[in-house]
Image (cartoon, rainbow, N blue to C red):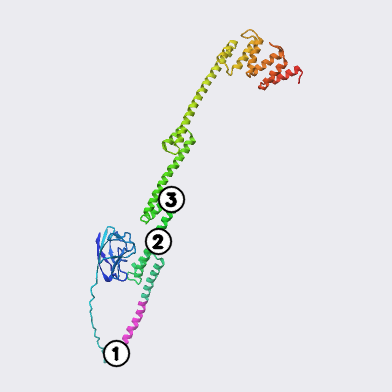
């Protein structure tokens, strides 16, 4: 029956030296698995082992949830450490005091048993009867023994099956189940050693996995990889380096994200190519690598805007001038006099209405309207208008030379003006030219 201490924050166990021989004694919270029981949350089911080796007393951490601390030093799991016969160890905030005391000399008691002599019956018949009775008893005992032997075999076979299944699964839970089912079973010590072996194997596997996971994190070299290591091994042997590498990668990520954001902002600003877009870039990234480019672009946009406004102002002035010219020309057309057309030409020299105006003046002189008829003066005005590219003036000149109106008749000169009018896309110039050729008798 395990010895149990019920103190909540400090435990005391007095242990005989003879108990430490062989496999020693185990301290923990599980009554089925331990020789000494300490009921406290800090204590694992099997937490520590006390043993003796030669003249040394040893304590061994069995890889509990909290480490065993002796004299301020944390023990490595499954590494026996020498202690004094009276030692206080700490597990978390809990203290356990061990006092190892030598066993008392066993009493050498001697006893003798005198054998009573056999008494033989004087009556042979009674002897025979006794033999018959003895034979009957032995027969009944044989039958009962056979039944008891079968029951013992069945129990033995069941225990053997549970033990073999535990060996096959190699799981602590199955070894613990065996000990719970058979506290004094044939394989109890083997089960306890198997539990310790599996714990040690797990410890080694965890250490190997810790190293492998950290090395993989270093090879992958990503935030996720180091975060995964820290999550899986919050108390791992590489936790400090993992946190340092994670911090470095996070700084690099922040820097890269800022660079990506800057490049994206510059792409947006340069694509929009507006003063507002560049000013927004400078506001978001005042010292960005493209800040000088943004300032230069803003300057160019301001200059281009000023030039555009100047151009628009000139265009508007020109439009207003054209409206004035149009209005003045319409007024001159309403009057339709040489004086009105001459006034327009003085006010707006070189306008797009100048050739038309001169053609009208020539028409008025040629027909004597608003002035005395003067065909020669009319031809002069037609000539000026035609030289400015006015097609009607060209047709008028050709007509006057064709029929000798105000000038000497000259079919050749008339034909030249018809050709110029036709080249200038006058719709009837070719028709009149063909008629003139027929009159001249030329093909």
Residue at position x 32%, y 87% from top? 132
Q: Are marks 1 and 3 in contact (CB under 8 Å)?
A: no
Out of 143 and 177, give the one closest to the viewer. Answer: 177
- Magenta segment's dominant SS is helix
Answer above or below: position of 158 versus 301. Answer: below
Q: For this rendering, which residue is in front, 413 or 431?
A: 413
Which residue is denoted by mark 1 in the rendering?
127
Q: CA distance from mark 3 to mark 2?
A: 25 Å
Image location (x, y in percent) of residue 195: 36, 66
Q: Position of residue 41 (x, y in %)?
A: 29, 59
Q: Quadrant of the C terminus?
A: top right
Label whose residue precedes the other's in the sequence (3 or 2): 2
Q: Quadrant of residue 334?
A: top right
* Mark number, residue 205: 2
Identify residue for label 3: 222
Q: Residue at x 75, y 18 (%)?
A: 438
Mark 1 lies on a secondary structure that is helix
Mark 1–mark 3 Cα distance, whole angstroms, equals 98 Å
Percent position (x, y) of residue 89?
Answer: 27, 62
């Amino acid at each position: 029956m395990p010895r149990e201490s019920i103190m909540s924050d400090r435990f005391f166990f007095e242990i005989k030296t003879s108990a430490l021989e062989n496999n020693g004694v185990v301290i923990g919270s599980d009554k089925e698995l331990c020789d000494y029981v300490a009921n406290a949350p800090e204590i694992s089911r099997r937490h520590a082992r006390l043993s003796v080796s030669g003249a040394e007393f040893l304590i061994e951490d069995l890889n509990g949830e909290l480490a065993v601390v002796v004299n301020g030093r944390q023990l490595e799991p499954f590494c026996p450490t020498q202690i004094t016969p009276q030692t206080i160890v700490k597990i978390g905030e809990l203290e356990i005091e061990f006092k190892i005391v030598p066993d008392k000399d066993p009493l050498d008691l001697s006893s003798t048993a005198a054998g009573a002599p056999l008494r033989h019956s004087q009556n042979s018949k009674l002897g025979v009867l006794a033999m018959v009775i003895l034979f009957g008893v032995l027969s009944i005992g044989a039958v009962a023994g056979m039944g008891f032997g079968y029951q013992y075999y069945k129990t033995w076979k069941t225990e053997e099956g549970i033990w073999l299944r535990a060996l096959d699964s190699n799981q602590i839970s199955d070894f613990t189940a065996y000990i719970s089912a058979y506290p004094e079973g044939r394989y109890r010590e083997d089960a306890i050693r198997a539990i310790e072996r599996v714990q040690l194997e797990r410890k080694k596997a965890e250490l190997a996995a810790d190293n492998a996971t950290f090395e993989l994190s270093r090879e992958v070299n990503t935030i996720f990889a180091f975060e995964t290591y820290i999550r899986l091994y919050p108390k791992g042997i590489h936790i400090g380096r993992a946190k340092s590498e994670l911090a470095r990668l996070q700084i690099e990520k922040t820097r890269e994200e800022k660079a990506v954001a800057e490049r994206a902002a510059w792409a947006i600003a340069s694509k929009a190519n507006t003063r507002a877009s560049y000013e927004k870039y400078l506001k978001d990234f005042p010292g960005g690598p493209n800040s000088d480019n943004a300032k230069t672009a803003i300057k160019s946009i301001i200059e281009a805007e000023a030039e555009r406004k100047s151009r628009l102002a000139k265009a508007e002035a020109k439009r207003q001038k054209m409206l004035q010219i149009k209005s003045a020309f319409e007024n001159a057309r309403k009057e339709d006099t040489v004086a009105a057309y001459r006034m327009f030409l003085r006010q707006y020299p070189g306008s797009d209405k100048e050739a038309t105006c001169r053609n009208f003046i020539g028409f008025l002189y040629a027909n004597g309207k608003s002035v005395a008829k003067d065909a020669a003066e009319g031809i002069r005005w037609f000539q000026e208008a035609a030289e400015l590219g006015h097609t009607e003036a060209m047709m008028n000149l050709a007509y006057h030379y064709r029929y000798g109106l105000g000038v000497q008749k000259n079919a050749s000169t008339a034909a030249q003006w018809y050709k110029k009018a036709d080249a200038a896309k006058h719709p009837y110039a070719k028709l009149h030219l063909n008629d003139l050729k027929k009159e001249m008798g030329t093909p």
